[in-house]
Image: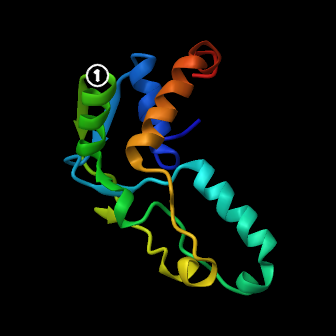
Amino acid sequence: FGVEDQGWAAWFIIALLLKRPITLYGNGKQVRDLLHVHDLCALYEQAIKNVGAVRGHAFNIGGGRENAQSLLEFFKEIETRHGLKSPMAYARIRPGDQKVFISDNSKIKKHLGWKPRISVENGVAALVSWVKENRDSIASLY
């Protein structure tokens, strides 16, 4: 379950499947990286097993450059691969919104050898399937 600011991919997929209106702030060319929750959980498990290698460090974790897309690219993929499309409203970019956010995972890769394994395409397909399977439960929350 996402919200516009955190979990935005889930937020948009849920909105598309529930036929809810979507507003893009700015021109949609903002770039974000996507990280599948299974990759993040695998990292947590690996860090717990190797606590000595990560103790006392802060890490930047995300999908990285390989899993980065603009919002427009994301919506194009959703439409092309999954047939989901909705009219979008555009609004002024929000104050403080970053044009580009891509995590630099190099430090965690150096410490644990970790990198995301699930591609954007496979992760989005899994998320679309999950939302479809749980549509009624999700709809009751929105």
Residue 41 picture location, percent across and down? 68, 55
Nearest the camera: 28 or 44? Answer: 44
Residue 120 position within the rendered picture, expressed as x and y whole percent measured from the top left: 40, 47
Instruction: Check disc 1 and report the residue beneath it.
Output: 86
Circle count: 1
Amino acid found under the numbered disc labelled 1: Ser
Q: Which residue is found at the position 62% from the left and 57% from the top?
A: 40
Q: At x 23% / y 37%, what residue is drawn?
A: 90
> Could one spot residue 96 in this view of the protein?
no
Determine whether the residue tagged by mark 1 lies in a helix, strand or loop.
Answer: loop
Q: Nearer the viewer, residue 23 or 66?
A: 66
Quadrant in which the C terminus appears: top right
* Mark 1 neighbour class, 10 Å CA radius: few under 14, some 14 to 19, many 20 or more: some
Rendered view: 133 above or below 2: above
Residue at the location (51% across, 57% down)? 117
- Left-right relation of 81 to 116: left
Looking at this view, name the residue that lies furthest to the top: 136
Q: Answer whether residue 73 is visible to the viewer in this image.
A: yes
The percent coordinates of residue 126 (x first, y second) are 51, 34
In this rendering, would 90 be left or right of 55? left
In this view, 5 is above or below 23:
below
The residue lying toward the viewer, choosing from 103 and 110, is 110
- Residue at image position (46%, 60%) is 63
Q: Is residue 38 above or below residue 90?
A: below
Which quadrant: the N terminus?
top right
